[in-house]
Amino acid sequence: MPHWQYLHAAKTYQLHIPTGMASKMFTHLPSRSIFVDEDLYLGEEWLGHWMAHELGHLATNSAREDDAERVAREYQRRLAKAGR
Ligand SMILES: [Zn+2]
């Protein structure tokens, strides 16, 4: 989504923004939505890597980073395999 819209959504939900990702993307668990700032989009590989992390939050229904990362590693592994 456009940067202004992303900022608005982040402000509205006041939530989970991944460590080190300050303002690139976040997941809103109640609505099962992932918000991505298009100004910071760095390509398909970048998106795949971070989307795996965000999907980890959804899969575990947890805002905890370690929960998300545990699942994300598996998604990233599958993604790397599919890219071959
Ligand atoms: Zn996270």
Image (cartoon, grey):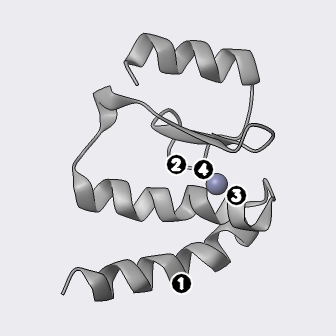
Q: Residue at x 63, y 23 (%)?
A: 10
CA neighbours of label 4 inside 10 A, class few (<14), some (14 to 19), many (20+): few
Q: CA distance from mark 2 to mark 1?
A: 20 Å
Answer yes or no: do the residues labelled 4 and 3 have beta carbons within 8 Å? no
Q: How many marks?
A: 4
Tell me which label, 3 or 1, sits earlier in the chain.
3
Q: Which one is in front in this view, the residue at disc 4 or the one at disc 1?
A: 1
Answer yes or no: do the residues labelled 2 and 4 have beta carbons within 8 Å? yes
Q: Is residue 42 left or right of residue 29?
A: left
Residue 83 is drawn in which quadrant?
bottom left
Q: Which residue is mark 3?
A: 58
Residue 67 is drawn in which quadrant?
bottom right
Q: Which residue is mark 1?
A: 74
Q: Which one is in front in this view, the residue at disc 4 or the one at disc 3?
A: 3
Amino acid at pointer 3: Leu
Secondary element type, mark 2: loop
> Where residue 30 sits: x, y (%)?
81, 39
Secondary element type, mark 1: helix
Secondary element type, mark 4: loop
CA neighbours of label 1 inside 10 A, class few (<14), some (14 to 19), many (20+): some
Q: CA distance from mark 4 to mark 1?
A: 19 Å
Q: For ligand 1, give the image quadrant.
A: bottom right
Q: Which residue is mark 4?
A: 19
Q: Which residue is mark 2?
A: 20
> Where residue 27 sits: x, y (%)?
64, 43
In the rendered image, the quadrant that contains the N terminus is top left
Tell me which label, 4 or 1, sits earlier in the chain.
4
Q: CA distance from mark 3 to mark 1?
A: 14 Å
